[in-house]
Image: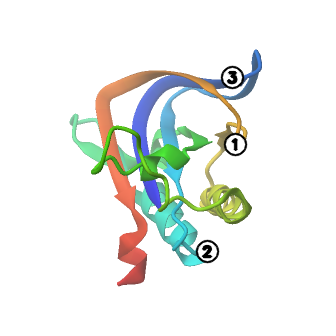
Amino acid sequence: MKVVLQRSKKASVTVDGRVTGEIESGYVLLVGIAHSDTEADAVYAAKKIAGLRLFEDEDGKMNRSIEEAGGSVLSISQFTLYGDVKKGRRPSFVEAARPGQAEPLWLKFNDELRSHGLQVETGVFGAMMDVQLVNDGPVTIIVDSDGAKK
């Protein structure tokens, strides 16, 4: 599982002209799921993200978690994170999980984030989405669940 985390001051996702998720301060998560991922990957990634200290404390150091900062999460499924561009000009998505596997793992990941006390808004799995965000910092981190397999 790959998650591109962007600290955001404000973000929203729209599908067919309707806002499906919107947050103020927090994280925008672009979530890619590989065919080799399991529930353990979702649990690992959610726990890691919930515990990251990416918000400034009173001394201006990144020392506060999203929960301590009162932030929320906007989670967006993003199979294109597994696009392989090593050959040719068109990405190959053979590493990305098929929808029947990916959607339940994405839902599990979101539920795991909620179990850590986070408010989670979402996009719509498999839909064409318009995402708007104000990147804060900018702070962008990639979380890879390969750590769950070690």
Can you tell which of label 3 and label 1 is closer to the viewer? 1
Q: Is residue 146 above or below residue 63?
A: below
In this rendering, the answer to whether 91 lies above or below 14 is below
- Residue 127 at x, y = what percent? 71, 35
Q: Which mark is residue 14?
A: 3
- Using the image as rendered, state which of residue 11 and residue 13 is in the foreground: 13
The residue at 37%/56% (across/down) is 143
Q: In terms of image quadrants, where is residue 7?
A: top left
Residue where numbered disc 1 is placed: 126
Measuring from the top left, give residue 44's x and y in whole percent: 48, 70
- Is there any visible trace of residue 56 in the rendered image? no
The residue at 61%/74% (across/down) is 39
Q: Residue furthest top?
A: 17
Seen at 49% across and 22% down, the residue is: 133
Q: In the depicted view, which residue is nearer to us: 127 or 114?
A: 127
Assess disc 2: are there few (<14), some (14-19) or many (≥20) residues with their C-alpha within 10 Å of its C-alpha. few
Task: Specify the amino acid type for callout 1.
Answer: Gly
Residue 34 shown left or right of residue 65 in the figure: right
Residue at numbered disc 2? 39
Placement of 131 over or under 57, stated as above or below? above
Front residue of 59/134: it is 134
Q: Going from the N terminus, do you reach mark 2 or mark 1 first?
A: 2
**Is 39 placed left or right of 127 in the picture?**
left
